[in-house]
Amino acid sequence: MKKLILCSIALIGFAISANAQEEKNAIGLRLGDSDGFGTEVSYQRYLNEKNRLEFDLGWRSSNNFDAFRLTGLYQWVWNIDGGFNWYVGAGGGIAQVDFDNVPPGFDDSETYVYAAGDIGIEYDFDFPLLLSLDFRPEFGFGDVNDDVDFDIALGVRYQF
């Protein structure tokens, strides 16, 4: 009976550890520039070996405006060779912009939504570091931001 309980506990432990190795998370910074946005805190959650979710929270304070935005993307990941991967994704987000030099009587803020695509390349090191370079076109839907922005960024993330 003791051996059966001990073997069951060992099997459950191996199953949990094998499952934990398949699921990866990564958190870090995405450093780029698109019409004033620069730094984003980035979180990636692998759903399986070839698919993941990415959530980015960006903020910017400049002479003309203060802004923040939240982006969510679904990404497909393919291995090129060894630690090199490439990926594409689609998603969208919401942003809030507060303008500074606005004449009295005018609304100085805007909330808008946008659709986003994503294509990039990344290198997954043997230790828990993930470096990426990606291109993200964004299609804004709002009074002030109703155009296309092109965002190129370098990502540096810690995997756990």
Image (spheres, rainbow, N blue to C red):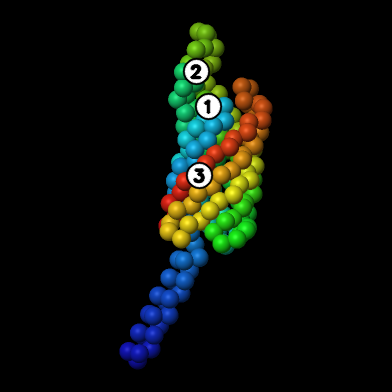
Residue 83 numbered mark, or none: none
In this rendering, is residue 58 above or below 145? Answer: below
For badge 1, the amino acid type reads: Gly
Residue lying farthest front? 81
Which quadrant: the N terminus?
bottom left
Disc 3 is placed on an element classified as: strand
The residue located at (55%, 51%) in the rendering is: 122
Q: CA distance from mark 3 to mark 2?
A: 26 Å
Q: CA distance from mark 1 to mark 2?
A: 10 Å
Amino acid carrying label 3: it is Gly
The residue positioned 50% from the left and 44% from the top of the image is 155
- Circles 1 and 2 in contact, beta carbons < 8 Å: yes
Seen at 36% across and 85% down, the residue is 5
Q: Callout 3: 10 Å neighbours few (<14), some, many (20+)?
A: many
Q: Earlier in the sequence, mark 3 or mark 2?
A: 2
Q: Residue 137: image x %, image y %?
A: 64, 37
Can I make out residue 91 in this image?
no
Comparing labels 3 and 2, the label whose residue is closer to the camera? 3
Per the image, the residue denoted by label 1 is: 36
29 is higher (above) or lower (below) than 149: below
Rendering coords of residue 98 (x, y %): 50, 22
Where does label 2 land, which residue? 64
Which numbered tag is attached to residue 155? Answer: 3
